């Protein structure tokens, strides 16, 4: 029985605003070194006996970041399941099970969130092996992390008495008040709910059919009508929309009598707040964790993260300073769970540009950073990967100027193709059909100046596109 890591990569990570945005959620950010949390999740179980190709479930807006992340760690055999709309974890997992079952009737799913930080050791892999064995026996396995402190930001699982590595589940507890968290940690039989799962595809679908048949029916229809190209399965939109918006916890684990828990004792964090991020980082002698350009003086037990500006922290204690390219958050570390309320407030004030879009936007061909904008103008820094090209497109409301600052550009303007080197430029008049390509071996970098009456990203008419966006 092959074990397939099913990695759920569709979360939005709003509690890590302003770095995490709708178009670039936390799982795709390199928050702990060179690799993102998503890449670390893919790599975590490579080489384990019986492990099959990874299955990635993500939204349409994230599929190119998934592709880039896989390329960055040399993974070429993954299958990406694209959700046309977000429908929560139960339908996402059911769709993966439906797809796998058609190729492998004995498939085992090992379901993993893409945005958790997990330290692996021998005891971790022993727990995983025990969980897989229980899944092969028809059990619905969830994982519980041995708590290191009373935490009110996590759910808990109470395990029944057993000498086995995998124990029966007695009950699930939602995020508790502080007093209950202290009591549960002292009890010794409660574990943090890690959000990892293991089960056979067949047993999972049978259990879901018993409790939430609409989930299984919608998943099966969406897979039946899916658009399939090598490496990517795009679920049928109409069928997928009919799936209930429900988590696997509510749909299955709080109802089934087959639930068991595999306790694990390892370094683990859902990196669900700036406090938990600070907790996961190495600190200086004053307890400060610093990422990016920052200087601290008479400051302790604080988190300073800066993407661009130089941040100076003076006389602070237990404070988070998060300086993104276009927004700065300052709050007490112990209030960082409330950042989601800040995001809600910004949405209410129609400041969606600060919530939905990062200044640096990734595209399948590379990406761009917005440098400056004002009435009737906008300046961007475009970066195009070697061998890549943008769609053949035109605009109704803007003209553009391109200046090459690094590399070589191949530029199509209507029926003309020209080559530009560093320090050369060209003008793209309003309405012209144009395309930018990088024929070279190094990253192409271009400064783009847009002028016109409307400069929104939806003023793009794509005539040809290698990624199906026409």
Image: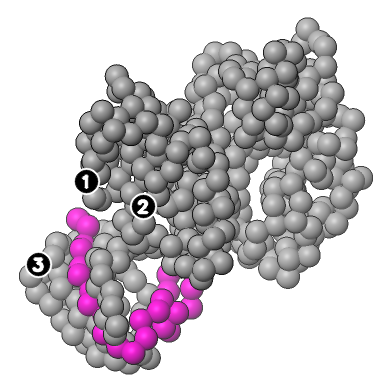
Q: Residue furthest top?
A: 163
Q: Separation of disc 3 and disc 1 at Cα?
A: 30 Å
Residue 63 to residue 267: above or below: below
Give the secondary structure at mark 2: strand
Q: Residue furthest front?
A: 315
Q: Residue 451: which numbered mark, if any? A: none
Q: Nearer the viewer, residue 413 or 156?
A: 156
State which tag comes first along the sequence, 3 or 2.
2
Q: Is residue 200 left or right of residue 182?
A: right
Residue 10 to residue 254: above or below: below
The residue pinned by badge 3 equals 422
Q: Residue furthest right?
A: 210
- Residue 168 percent across, percent down from the top left: 82, 20
Q: Nearer the viewer, residue 5 or 280?
A: 280
Q: Nearer the viewer, mark 3 or mark 2?
A: 2
- Residue 270 percent across, percent down from the top left: 55, 35
The residue pinned by badge 2 equals 328
Magenta residues span 442-470
Q: Is residue 214 left or right of residue 271?
A: right
- Residue 95 percent across, percent down from the top left: 72, 52
Whether residue 154 appears in this view of the structure is yes
Q: Residue at x 52, y 54 (%)?
A: 342
State which tag comes first along the sequence, 2 or 1.
1
Q: Is there a contact, CB below 8 Å, between mark 2 and mark 1?
A: no
The residue pinned by badge 1 equals 310
Q: Nearer the viewer, residue 311 or 315?
A: 315
26 magenta-colored = no
Give the secondary structure at mark 3: loop
Q: Separation of disc 3 and disc 2 at Cα?
A: 34 Å
Q: Residue at x 83, y 36 (%)?
A: 254
Question: The N terminus lies in which quarter of the figure?
Answer: top right
Q: Quadrant of residue 197?
A: top right
């Amino acid at each position: 029985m092959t074990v397939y890591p099913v990695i759920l990569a569709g979360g939005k990570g709003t509690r890590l605003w302003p770095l995490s945005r709708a178009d670039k959620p936390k799982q795709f950010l390199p928050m702990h070194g060179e690799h993102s949390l998503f890449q670390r999740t893919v790599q975590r179980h490579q080489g384990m006996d019986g492990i099959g190709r990874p299955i990635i479930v993500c939204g349409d807006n994230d599929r190119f970041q998934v592709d880039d992340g896989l390329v960055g760690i040399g993974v070429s055999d993954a299958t990406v399941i694209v959700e046309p709309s977000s429908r929560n974890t139960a339908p996402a997992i059911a769709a993966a099970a439906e797809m796998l079952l058609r190729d492998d009737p004995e498939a085992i799913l090992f379901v993993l969130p893409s945005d958790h930080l997990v330290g692996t050791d021998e005891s971790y892999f022993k727990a995983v092996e025990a969980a897989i064995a229980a899944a092969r026996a028809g059990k619905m396995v969830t994982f519980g992390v041995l708590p290191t402190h009373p935490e009110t930001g996590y759910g808990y699982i109470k395990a029944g008495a057993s000498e086995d590595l995998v124990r029966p589940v007695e009950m699930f507890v939602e995020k508790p008040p502080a007093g209950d968290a202290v009591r549960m940690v002292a009890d010794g039989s409660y574990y943090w709910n890690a959000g990892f799962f293991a089960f056979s595809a067949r047993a999972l679908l049978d259990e879901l059919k018993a409790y939430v048949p609409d989930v299984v029916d919608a998943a099966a229809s969406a897979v039946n009508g899916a658009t399939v190209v090598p490496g990517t399965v795009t679920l049928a939109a109409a069928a997928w929309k009919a799936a209930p918006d429900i988590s696997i916890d509510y749909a299955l684990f709080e109802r089934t009598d087959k639930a068991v828990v595999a306790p694990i004792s390892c370094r683990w964090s859902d990196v669900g707040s700036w406090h938990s991020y600070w907790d996961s980082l190495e600190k200086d002698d004053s307890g400060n964790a610093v990422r990016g350009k920052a200087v601290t003086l008479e400051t302790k037990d604080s988190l300073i993260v800066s993407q661009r500006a130089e941040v100076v922290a003076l006389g602070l204690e237990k404070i988070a300073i998060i300086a993104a390219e276009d927004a700065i958050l300052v709050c007490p570390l112990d209030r960082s769970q409330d950042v989601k309320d800040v995001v809600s407030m910004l949405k209410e004030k129609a400041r969606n540009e600060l919530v939905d879009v990062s200044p640096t936007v990734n595209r399948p061909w590379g990406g761009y950073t917005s440098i400056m904008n004002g009435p009737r103008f906008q300046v961007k820094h475009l970066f195009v990967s070697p061998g890549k090209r943008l769609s053949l497109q035109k605009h109704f409301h803007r003209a553009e100027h391109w200046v090459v600052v690094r590399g070589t550009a191949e530029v199509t303007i209507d029926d003309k193709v020209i080559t530009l080197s560093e320090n050369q430029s060209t003008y793209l008049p309003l309405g012209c059909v144009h395309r930018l390509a990088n024929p070279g071996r190094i990253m192409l970098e271009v400064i783009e100046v847009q002028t016109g009456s409307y400069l929104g990203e939806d003023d793009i008419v794509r005539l040809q596109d290698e990624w199906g966006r026409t």
